[in-house]
Image (cartoon, grey):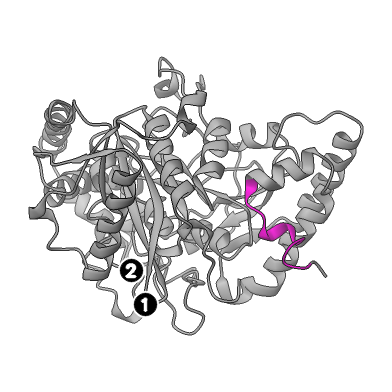
Amino acid sequence: MHTAATDPASLPAHKLANAIAARRLSPVDVVAAFLDRIAAQDAKLHAFVEVYADEARLAAEAADKAIRSGHAVGPLHGVPIALKDLIEIEGKIVTGGALIWRDRRAERTATLARKLIAQGMIVLGKTHTVEFAYGGWGTNSRMGTPWNPWDPKVPRTPGGSSSGSGVAVAARLAPWAIGTDTGGSVRLPASFCGLTGLKTTIGRVSTYGILPLSPTLDTPGALARSVEDAALLYRTMQGPDPLDPRTLGVPPGDLTEGWKRGIRGMRLARLPDAERGIVAADVLAAYEESLDVLARLGAEIASIELPLGFADAGALNGRIMSAEAYSILGDVVDDKNLPLDEDVRPRIRAGRDISARDYLSALTEREERKRAFAAAFASFDALLTPTTPMIALPLDAVDQSKTPAHFTRFANLLDLCALAVPNGIANGLPTSLQIIGRGYDEESVLRIGRAYQCATDWHDRTPPGQ
């Protein structure tokens, strides 16, 4: 039995990678430690759709031999990872969170999965998602809702749609995981589960082989225990892919050493007063304390005049999302005989009432909003908001007609990048700070997040019993 000090599952991914590369830890022991935790806890937590135990052990043996023989393929060789079950791996089940697809097998492997595997990373399995990845609370009435580990007694919202990825990382069933984000689906589980979540800019990471919801808005991202880990995974994920034309011509995305140099002199925009009414008092208090920390680190915190509010941005984002989701999934959601999640079905069917004219008008309005925001944001390095207006709710208190994505959809709509970092504990549950940066400036949001985490320890807090 591992002690807390030696248990590989207790280490953040970057330390795990270093220990494996230095041969202080064997990938065989690392994978075994995570599989043991999955076997002991996942019956309750319900993070995984499928666990690749035999394949992961075999890959760990191969990694161990390669590293011992001097044939490591890179700094992440032998490090395990979990993938959201939208990401295809040839021959493996890919459900997209839908019971009707419970036995569907992928016929290709996503570019993102290929990249991770080519770096020697070991896929532990696929994690649960909201059906068709359309929902921010993280619930799934047909496949089951993952259990947020921060409350062992009361089932609470894990955040969605990357619910299983968030729960797996928070409960130390995986050192990190891949999610996807169309309106907040990486950042919402990061908020509710006390994690660091990076939403990348469109075109930064290939979406080839990832089940689409809204191709205009879909972005893959990292769920991790720290900004250090998220940055390491980001470096591996990003880059051009001929199979995804939007990744071609994107400015280079690897991080310079500048991302570690602190934030003195950076200009950060605070949440306008008119936008604060929706935020719970304990979440707002944690947010204000975060601003104080960043100011003490040398950043200038200033007011901004936003050309559109978060509610309007969310509504426009939702129109585009519903229209595109219906174009992809209309035949499925219109079939009343199919056993779908009845909270998700109406979100997609709403796209049926959006005409071609309305959809194209929404895309035009989006471009206008992007230009207006760019002008207002020109003198700033980031916009700071709470990630969610509330902490994780009990499942029986969720109003499915509302969304926790009030502050997150803004970044998807405007083609921005964003980072969610833990910034407090309220009533035993995590609160979260969202750092929104301009498109393709992941380096700045990671830089701000890293400086914040160097000055605080919220990201080191773990759920009870973990």
Residue placed under numbered mark 2 in the picture: 391
- Numbered label attached to residue 287: none
- Label 2 crowd bin: few (<14), some (14–19), many (20+), radius 10 Å: many
In this rendering, position of residue 395 left or right of residue 376: right
Residue placed under numbered mark 1 in the picture: 427
Q: Of residues 244 and 13, which is closer to you in this image?
A: 13
* Residue 47 shows in the view: yes
Dots 2, 1 in contact, CB < 8 A:
yes
Where does the image place residue 255, in percent across and percent down from the top left?
50, 26
In this rendering, position of residue 155 left or right of residue 322: right
Task: Please tell me which of labels 2 and 1 falls first in the chain.
Answer: 2
Instruction: Indicate yes or no whether the magenta region holds residue 149.
Output: no
Secondary structure of the residue carrying tag 2 is loop
Residue 402 in which image quadrant: bottom left
Where does the image place residue 87, in percent across and percent down from the top left?
54, 44
User: Which amino acid type is marked by label 2?
Assistant: Ile
Q: Quadrant of the N terminus?
A: bottom right
Q: Quadrant of the C terminus?
A: bottom right
| In the rendered image, the vertical position of residue 199 relative to residue 166, given as above or below | above
